[in-house]
Image (cartoon, rainbow, N blue to C red):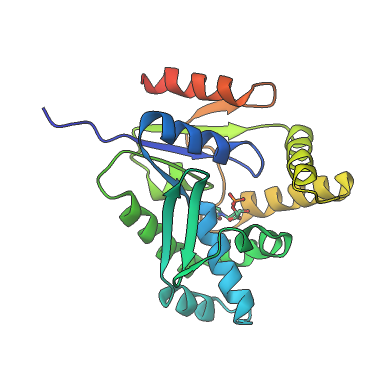
Protein backbone atom coordinates (compact mmCIF):
# COMPACT_ATOMS: atom_id res chain seq x y z
CA UNK A 1 0.00 0.00 0.00
CA UNK A 2 1.56 3.34 -0.97
CA UNK A 3 1.67 6.00 1.74
CA UNK A 4 -0.90 8.76 1.33
CA UNK A 5 0.62 12.14 0.45
CA UNK A 6 -1.38 14.86 2.19
CA UNK A 7 -1.63 18.29 0.62
CA UNK A 8 -3.40 20.56 3.07
CA UNK A 9 -4.12 23.88 1.42
CA UNK A 10 -5.30 26.92 3.37
CA UNK A 11 -6.36 30.20 1.78
CA UNK A 12 -7.83 33.30 3.33
CA UNK A 13 -7.40 37.04 3.81
CA UNK A 14 -4.53 38.78 5.62
CA UNK A 15 -4.64 38.35 9.37
CA UNK A 16 -7.03 35.40 9.49
CA UNK A 17 -4.37 33.38 11.32
CA UNK A 18 -3.40 31.11 8.42
CA UNK A 19 0.34 31.37 8.96
CA UNK A 20 0.32 30.57 12.66
CA UNK A 21 -2.14 27.73 12.19
CA UNK A 22 -0.45 26.26 9.11
CA UNK A 23 2.98 26.38 10.75
CA UNK A 24 1.79 24.63 13.90
CA UNK A 25 -0.31 22.12 12.04
CA UNK A 26 2.68 21.19 9.85
CA UNK A 27 4.88 20.79 12.95
CA UNK A 28 2.28 18.64 14.73
CA UNK A 29 1.77 16.37 11.74
CA UNK A 30 5.45 16.28 10.73
CA UNK A 31 4.62 17.77 7.32
CA UNK A 32 6.51 20.41 5.35
CA UNK A 33 5.21 23.98 5.59
CA UNK A 34 4.89 26.29 2.61
CA UNK A 35 4.35 30.02 3.21
CA UNK A 36 3.58 31.25 -0.32
CA UNK A 37 3.16 34.87 0.83
CA UNK A 38 6.84 34.88 1.84
CA UNK A 39 7.74 34.28 -1.80
CA UNK A 40 5.67 37.24 -3.05
CA UNK A 41 7.23 39.34 -0.31
CA UNK A 42 10.78 38.28 -1.22
CA UNK A 43 10.34 39.20 -4.89
CA UNK A 44 8.83 42.52 -3.80
CA UNK A 45 11.85 43.22 -1.59
CA UNK A 46 14.29 42.45 -4.38
CA UNK A 47 12.37 44.61 -6.87
CA UNK A 48 12.41 47.49 -4.37
CA UNK A 49 16.12 47.06 -3.66
CA UNK A 50 16.92 47.02 -7.38
CA UNK A 51 14.58 49.95 -7.97
CA UNK A 52 12.70 48.09 -10.66
CA UNK A 53 9.58 49.82 -11.92
CA UNK A 54 6.90 47.90 -10.00
CA UNK A 55 4.43 48.54 -12.81
CA UNK A 56 6.67 46.80 -15.36
CA UNK A 57 5.50 43.21 -15.45
CA UNK A 58 8.18 42.02 -17.91
CA UNK A 59 10.94 43.47 -15.72
CA UNK A 60 9.40 41.85 -12.62
CA UNK A 61 9.21 38.47 -14.36
CA UNK A 62 12.84 38.78 -15.51
CA UNK A 63 13.82 39.62 -11.95
CA UNK A 64 11.93 36.60 -10.57
CA UNK A 65 13.68 34.33 -13.09
CA UNK A 66 17.10 35.38 -11.89
CA UNK A 67 16.25 34.88 -8.22
CA UNK A 68 17.10 31.88 -6.11
CA UNK A 69 14.65 31.48 -3.27
CA UNK A 70 15.00 28.92 -0.56
CA UNK A 71 12.50 28.44 2.26
CA UNK A 72 14.17 26.61 5.13
CA UNK A 73 12.22 25.10 7.98
CA UNK A 74 13.45 26.46 11.32
CA UNK A 75 11.95 26.20 14.81
CA UNK A 76 10.46 29.71 14.53
CA UNK A 77 8.72 28.75 11.27
CA UNK A 78 10.43 29.54 8.03
CA UNK A 79 13.71 31.15 7.09
CA UNK A 80 13.59 32.88 3.73
CA UNK A 81 16.91 32.85 1.93
CA UNK A 82 17.06 34.92 -1.24
CA UNK A 83 20.17 34.72 -3.41
CA UNK A 84 22.06 33.37 -0.41
CA UNK A 85 20.93 36.08 2.05
CA UNK A 86 18.54 35.60 4.98
CA UNK A 87 15.72 38.09 4.31
CA UNK A 88 13.19 36.65 6.79
CA UNK A 89 12.91 39.93 8.70
CA UNK A 90 13.31 42.32 5.76
CA UNK A 91 10.29 40.89 3.94
CA UNK A 92 7.95 41.74 6.84
CA UNK A 93 8.31 45.54 6.79
CA UNK A 94 5.30 47.74 6.12
CA UNK A 95 6.83 49.01 2.87
CA UNK A 96 7.17 45.49 1.52
CA UNK A 97 3.66 44.57 2.73
CA UNK A 98 2.17 47.57 0.97
CA UNK A 99 4.05 46.92 -2.28
CA UNK A 100 3.40 43.16 -2.62
CA UNK A 101 0.25 43.83 -4.62
CA UNK A 102 2.35 44.91 -7.60
CA UNK A 103 3.99 41.50 -7.64
CA UNK A 104 0.78 39.65 -6.77
CA UNK A 105 -1.09 41.11 -9.74
CA UNK A 106 1.68 40.34 -12.26
CA UNK A 107 0.47 37.21 -14.05
CA UNK A 108 3.90 36.28 -15.40
CA UNK A 109 5.41 36.41 -11.92
CA UNK A 110 2.55 34.37 -10.47
CA UNK A 111 3.21 31.66 -13.07
CA UNK A 112 6.84 31.44 -12.01
CA UNK A 113 6.04 31.38 -8.30
CA UNK A 114 3.25 28.81 -8.69
CA UNK A 115 5.70 26.55 -10.52
CA UNK A 116 8.27 26.93 -7.70
CA UNK A 117 5.59 26.24 -5.11
CA UNK A 118 4.67 22.97 -6.80
CA UNK A 119 8.34 22.02 -7.03
CA UNK A 120 8.91 22.80 -3.35
CA UNK A 121 5.93 20.66 -2.41
CA UNK A 122 7.34 17.80 -4.48
CA UNK A 123 5.99 14.45 -3.46
CA UNK A 124 5.76 14.80 0.28
CA UNK A 125 3.02 15.76 2.70
CA UNK A 126 2.70 19.50 3.08
CA UNK A 127 0.65 22.29 4.64
CA UNK A 128 0.53 25.27 2.27
CA UNK A 129 -1.04 28.65 2.89
CA UNK A 130 -1.70 31.74 0.80
CA UNK A 131 -4.38 33.25 -1.41
CA UNK A 132 -4.55 30.80 -4.32
CA UNK A 133 -3.20 27.52 -2.96
CA UNK A 134 -6.64 25.87 -2.91
CA UNK A 135 -7.64 27.19 -6.34
CA UNK A 136 -4.55 27.48 -8.55
CA UNK A 137 -1.45 25.97 -6.97
CA UNK A 138 -2.91 22.74 -5.59
CA UNK A 139 -6.37 22.29 -7.14
CA UNK A 140 -6.21 18.59 -6.26
CA UNK A 141 -5.16 19.14 -2.64
CA UNK A 142 -6.36 16.36 -0.36
CA UNK A 143 -7.79 18.94 2.06
CA UNK A 144 -8.82 22.53 1.42
CA UNK A 145 -9.73 25.20 3.92
CA UNK A 146 -10.76 28.81 3.63
CA UNK A 147 -9.83 30.58 6.85
CA UNK A 148 -11.61 33.82 7.56
CA UNK A 149 -12.12 36.29 10.41
CA UNK A 150 -13.94 39.60 10.70
CA UNK A 151 -12.06 42.76 9.73
CA UNK A 152 -12.36 43.95 13.37
CA UNK A 153 -10.77 40.80 14.70
CA UNK A 154 -8.00 40.77 12.09
CA UNK A 155 -7.21 44.41 12.85
CA UNK A 156 -7.05 43.71 16.60
CA UNK A 157 -4.74 40.72 16.08
CA UNK A 158 -2.39 42.64 13.84
CA UNK A 159 -2.40 45.60 16.23
CA UNK A 160 -1.48 43.36 19.16
CA UNK A 161 1.24 41.66 17.14
CA UNK A 162 2.82 44.99 16.17
CA UNK A 163 2.49 46.34 19.73
CA UNK A 164 4.31 43.27 21.02
CA UNK A 165 7.09 44.01 18.55
CA UNK A 166 7.31 47.49 20.03
CA UNK A 167 5.74 49.24 17.02
CA UNK A 168 3.22 51.96 17.72
CA UNK A 169 0.54 52.06 15.06
CA UNK A 170 -2.74 53.86 14.54
CA UNK A 171 -5.45 51.20 14.74
CA UNK A 172 -7.78 53.03 12.36
CA UNK A 173 -5.04 53.31 9.76
CA UNK A 174 -4.27 49.62 10.26
CA UNK A 175 -7.90 48.70 9.64
CA UNK A 176 -7.93 50.73 6.43
CA UNK A 177 -4.73 49.03 5.25
CA UNK A 178 -6.25 45.60 5.90
CA UNK A 179 -9.42 46.54 4.00
CA UNK A 180 -7.36 47.88 1.14
CA UNK A 181 -5.26 44.71 0.99
CA UNK A 182 -8.47 42.59 1.02
CA UNK A 183 -9.86 44.60 -1.84
CA UNK A 184 -6.70 44.08 -3.89
CA UNK A 185 -6.51 40.37 -3.07
CA UNK A 186 -10.18 39.77 -3.98
CA UNK A 187 -10.25 41.74 -7.21
CA UNK A 188 -6.98 41.07 -9.05
CA UNK A 189 -7.41 39.40 -12.42
CA UNK A 190 -4.96 36.55 -11.82
CA UNK A 191 -4.98 34.30 -8.78
CA UNK A 192 -7.55 36.34 -6.83
CA UNK A 193 -8.49 35.26 -3.34
CA UNK A 194 -11.71 33.28 -3.40
CA UNK A 195 -13.16 30.33 -1.61
CA UNK A 196 -12.76 27.12 -3.63
CA UNK A 197 -16.13 25.35 -3.91
CA UNK A 198 -14.66 22.29 -2.20
CA UNK A 199 -12.94 24.20 0.62
CA UNK A 200 -14.21 24.02 4.21
CA UNK A 201 -15.00 27.50 5.53
CA UNK A 202 -13.53 28.23 8.97
CA UNK A 203 -14.35 31.47 10.76
CA UNK A 204 -11.56 31.95 13.28
CA UNK A 205 -12.96 35.19 14.77
CA UNK A 206 -14.06 33.54 18.00
CA UNK A 207 -11.69 30.60 18.05
CA UNK A 208 -8.29 30.21 19.67
CA UNK A 209 -5.40 28.87 17.59
CA UNK A 210 -5.71 25.55 19.40
CA UNK A 211 -9.40 25.36 18.54
CA UNK A 212 -8.76 26.09 14.87
CA UNK A 213 -6.05 23.41 14.72
CA UNK A 214 -8.33 20.94 16.47
CA UNK A 215 -11.08 21.68 13.93
CA UNK A 216 -8.74 21.23 10.98
CA UNK A 217 -7.37 17.97 12.38
CA UNK A 218 -10.89 16.67 12.80
CA UNK A 219 -11.58 17.30 9.11
CA UNK A 220 -8.24 15.84 8.06
CA UNK A 221 -8.71 12.84 10.32
CA UNK A 222 -5.18 12.94 11.76
O1 LIG B 1 0.33 36.04 3.40
P1 LIG B 1 1.09 37.33 3.32
O2 LIG B 1 0.39 38.46 3.97
O3 LIG B 1 2.50 37.20 3.77
O4 LIG B 1 1.15 37.65 1.77
C1 LIG B 1 1.66 38.86 1.29
C2 LIG B 1 0.92 39.28 0.01
O5 LIG B 1 1.27 38.39 -1.04
C3 LIG B 1 -0.61 39.22 0.11
O6 LIG B 1 -1.18 40.45 0.47
C4 LIG B 1 -1.04 38.82 -1.27
O7 LIG B 1 -1.35 39.94 -2.04
C5 LIG B 1 0.17 38.13 -1.87
N1 LIG B 1 -0.04 36.69 -2.00
C6 LIG B 1 -0.57 36.22 -3.16
N2 LIG B 1 -0.74 34.88 -3.34
C7 LIG B 1 -0.37 34.00 -2.39
C8 LIG B 1 0.18 34.48 -1.19
C9 LIG B 1 0.33 35.84 -1.01
O8 LIG B 1 -0.94 37.00 -4.03
N3 LIG B 1 -0.53 32.70 -2.62
The quarter of the picture where residue 51 lies is: bottom right
Q: Position of residue 143 (x, y in %)?
A: 39, 31
Q: Evaluate whether residue 175 shows in this view.
A: yes
User: In this orientation, does residue 198 appear?
Assistant: no
Q: How many marks?
A: 0
Residue 145: x %, y % from top left: 49, 32
Q: Quadrant of the N terminus?
A: top left
Taking 163 as reference, is 114 above or below it?
A: below
In the image, is 122 to the left or to the right of 13?
Answer: left
Task: Tell which of 31 and 173 is nearer to you.
Answer: 31
Is residue 126 positioned above or below 166 on the image? Answer: above
Residue situated furthest left in the rendering: 1
Q: Determine whether 222 is above or below 70 in the image.
A: above
* Left or right of residue 16: residue 67: left
Q: Quadrant of the C terminus?
A: top left
Q: Residue at x 62, y 63 (%)?
A: 90
**Residue in the foreground of this view, choosing between 162 and 65:** 162
**Residue 180 located left or right of residue 53:** right
Q: Position of residue 205 (x, y in %)?
A: 69, 26
Q: Measuring 60% from the left and 57% from the top, which residue is drawn there?
A: 188
Residue 162 horizontal/vertical position (percent): 76, 46
Amino acid sequence: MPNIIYVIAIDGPAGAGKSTVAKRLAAELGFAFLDTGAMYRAITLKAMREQINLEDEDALAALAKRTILDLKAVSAGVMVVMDGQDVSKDIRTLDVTNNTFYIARAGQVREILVEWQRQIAGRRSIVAEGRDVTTVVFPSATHKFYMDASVEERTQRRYKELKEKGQDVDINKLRLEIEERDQKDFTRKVGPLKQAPDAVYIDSSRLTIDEVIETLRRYIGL
